[in-house]
Amino acid sequence: SLVTVLPKIVKKQFFQRNCASTLAFIESSKDGSVSRSSLSLLAAAQKLSNPITAVITGSQAEKTAQALKSSYACNNLEKVVIFEDPKLDTCLPEELTPLFVKLLKNNDYSHFVVSNSSVGKSVLPRVGALLDVQPVCEVTVIKDPKTFVRPIYAGNIISTIECPAEKKLLSIRASAFTPIMEGSMESVAIEKGTDIPPSDLDVIWVKTLLTKSERPELTSAENVVTGGRALKDKKTFEELLSPLADVLHAAMGATRASVDNGLCDNSLQIGQTGKVVAPNLYIAVGVSGAVQHLAGMKDSKVIVAINNDPDAPIFNVADYGLQGDLYKIVPELTEKLRR
Ligand code: FAD
């Protein structure tokens, strides 16, 4: 009917007049599905109201592209370009950067968006330097195609900036955008890209050391249990927090003090120099609440703090505070939740 056709015509005319378009770098998970942070990235890209081209790299690119097309719904996604080369599996920024620079130079993309994953974070500054464009990092709100909100000074100031660059380079804070919904996109074309430019730096991938865990992935977990320095040693950290994390099907997190003191692996670190999380439930156990830690978790929906110091700054951001000895409270809480 005219009612459904008209908005499409208007939208198309707007795109043609606007000439704006977005290139979105989509990352594959280990099993070839679309990474969760990329689903949030596409949700953010939709807000730019441009036609979107997704680019997927590595030997699983075709599988990821098919998964995206058949399992999700993203407004404005027009095509997916895949570069199926196993040399891109390691996601070395030195290999990916020349490819993205070439795509951005040879096409009229007005926006290039990546998620704030470790790959996105290492690629974007390199692309920015080679194109002589200042990237806008950790975007949490897209107000319009040139106005973005991002935290600065470890999240103590929220700045709104207008970006005048012709090509806008953005990294998106995945936890700030709800992932795109499930669905399917029949009309999306999948194209094979060719002529991957060689790396201009002599870098060789030596090996991959992955931390194996049965727990949910920290940055996308619904619940997170975080242990601070008060946990004393590795054994205590594991024995006290694991049962609590198990009953809540939670991911485990840590402060930098816990990591530096060898209580856990550094992949668990949350904060300014660690991961940024925004789960439904965040339980901070023996965590003081330093600004650098808050920068990585204060957007959590419900924050529970367990600390014996009533003046600990974590209580300023907590929805529920349990003041007392964590060695008594945590086992009790775990037992009650289990029941
Ligand atoms: P502490 O500050 O030592 O707090 C331990 C808490 O446990 C205290 O509040 C204490 O009251 C409580 N406690 C002790 N015993 C008990 C008990 N029996 N029962 C209950 N409570 C108890 N930190 C991060 O976490 N992430 C970052 O990314 C990060 N980046 C940083 C970047 C820079 C540039 C700098 C300078 C620092 C950074 N830090 C970061 C470090 C940060 O400043 C803090 O030092 C750190 O977060 C403190 O960790 P914590 O809360 O585990 O330890």
Image (spheres, helix red, strand yellow):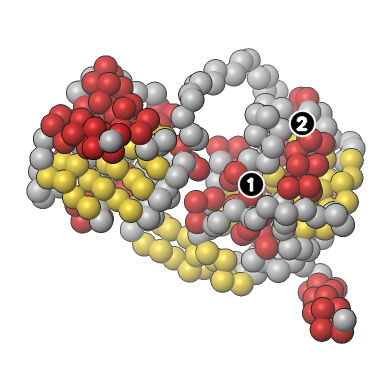
Residue 307 lies left or right of residue 58; in this view the side is: left
Where does the image place residue 167, in percent across and percent down from the top left? 70, 60
Q: Which is nearer the eye, 86 or 161? A: 86
Where does the image place residue 260, in percent across and percent down from the top left? 30, 26
Q: Which is nearer the eye, 137 or 98? A: 137
Q: Quadrant of ligand 1?
A: top left
Where does the image place residue 217, in percent across and percent down from the top left? 50, 35
Q: Name which quarter of the figure residue 274 lies in.
A: top left
Instruction: Classify the position of the C terminus by image quarter.
Output: top left
> What's the residue type where badge 1 is placed?
Ser
Q: Which is nearer the eye, 60 or 129? A: 60
Which residue shows up at 13% across the image and 32% down it?
A: 328
Is residue 122 visible to the viewer in this orientation of the structure?
no
Q: Residues within 10 Å of mark 1 (few under 14, many from 20)?
A: many
Where does the image place residue 200, in percent across and percent down from the top left? 74, 31
Q: Name which quarter of the figure residue 245 lies in.
A: top left
For numbered disc 1, what is the local secondary structure? helix
Is the residue 30 above or below the residue 205 in the image?
A: below
Which residue shows up at 87% across the image and 46% down it?
A: 190
For numbered disc 2, what is the local secondary structure? loop
Measure the alpha-carbon separation of dots 1 and 2.
15 Å
Residue named by callout 2: 60
Residue named by callout 1: 38
> What's the residue type where badge 2 is placed?
Gln
Mark 1–mark 2 CB contact (< 8 Å): no
Judge: label 2 CB < 8 Å from ligand 1.
Answer: no
Is residue 2 visible to the viewer in this orientation of the structure?
yes
Residue 15 lies left or right of residue 117; in this view the side is: right
